[in-house]
Amino acid sequence: METVKPYNQGGKKEEVEQMFDQIAHSYDFLNHFFSLGIDIIWRKRAIRILKKYHPKKVLDVATGTADFALQAVKSKLNASSIVGVDISEGMLEVGRKKVKERGFEQIIELRKGDSENLPFEDHSFDAYTVAFGVRNFENLEQGMREMLRVLRPNGVGVVLEFSRPKHFPIKQLFGFYFKYVMPTLGKWVSKDSRAYAYLPESVAQFPSGKDFLAVMEKVGYQRVRCIPLSGGIASIYIGEK
């Protein structure tokens, strides 16, 4: 499988970190603008699934600006602790400001960390979440295996990620929007000519649907399943330990 990178100048991990550092100032605006706010609905759906497991200690991998962690608190997930990790210090800085402004510092802690080498003991968390982050992993299997390692027995991983719609007309509309509209507007607002061209490229390369479930099973997840969202534009993947 070909490795898709933002700038094609070095390792994917370093390039992803550089990219998110550069677009951190405009990330939240563009994220909600491009999705017309639907990404918030997707996050709430993922959190409703997570609630059924009653997790107390939650790890939010590729937390970015902490949108998922903040939404989890606002949606009354009732976790006692949410730790967000990300490789981009620029994104984390934005996230820490948001956490402080909302008064959630006692619940949410943000730390710099690598999804493929997490700084936590085995069995540290009841659940983990990843929202729009797994396709940025340099080694997908290693990242999925590492997140499984830090789950306690019977813990759950919930992954929210873009996927590829298969049916007319959503497939065609989504393809045009992702390939032409998003990169043009993203370049104009973020001032990064590659960041929003990388997004559709990374989605096209990502093994979505049954292919991603196969990756989860390969590295040891149990009872894996997939829930398509909005006609297949995104999907929620659930796997247990």
Image (tube, grey):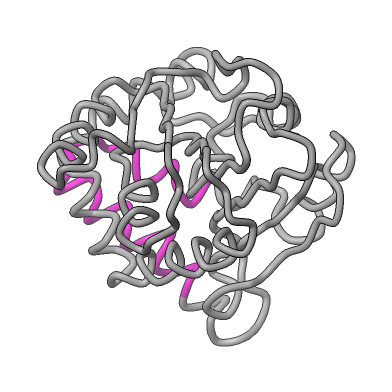
Q: Pinpoint residue 136: horizontal percent, then vertical percent.
A: 53, 35
The segment highlighted magenta reads: 174-201
The vertical placement of 120 against 185, above or below, is: above
Which residue is outermost to the bottom? 169
Quadrant where the C terminus is found in the figure:
top right
- Whether residue 186 is visible: yes
Asked whether 97 or 15 is in front, the reply is 97
Q: Pinpoint residue 30: horizontal percent, then vertical percent.
A: 23, 54
| Magenta stretch encompasses residue 198 | yes
Q: Residue at x 64, y 30 (%)?
A: 3
210 displayed left or right of 107? right
Magenta-colored segment: predominant secondary structure:
helix
Please give the count of numbered marks on the rendered protein. 0
Q: Pinpoint residue 147: horizontal percent, then vertical percent.
A: 66, 31
Quarter of the figure with residue 217 = top right
Q: Residue at x 32, y 58 (%)?
A: 182
| Magenta stretch encompasses residue 114 | no
Asked whether 208 or 174 is in front, the reply is 208
139 displayed left or right of 224? left
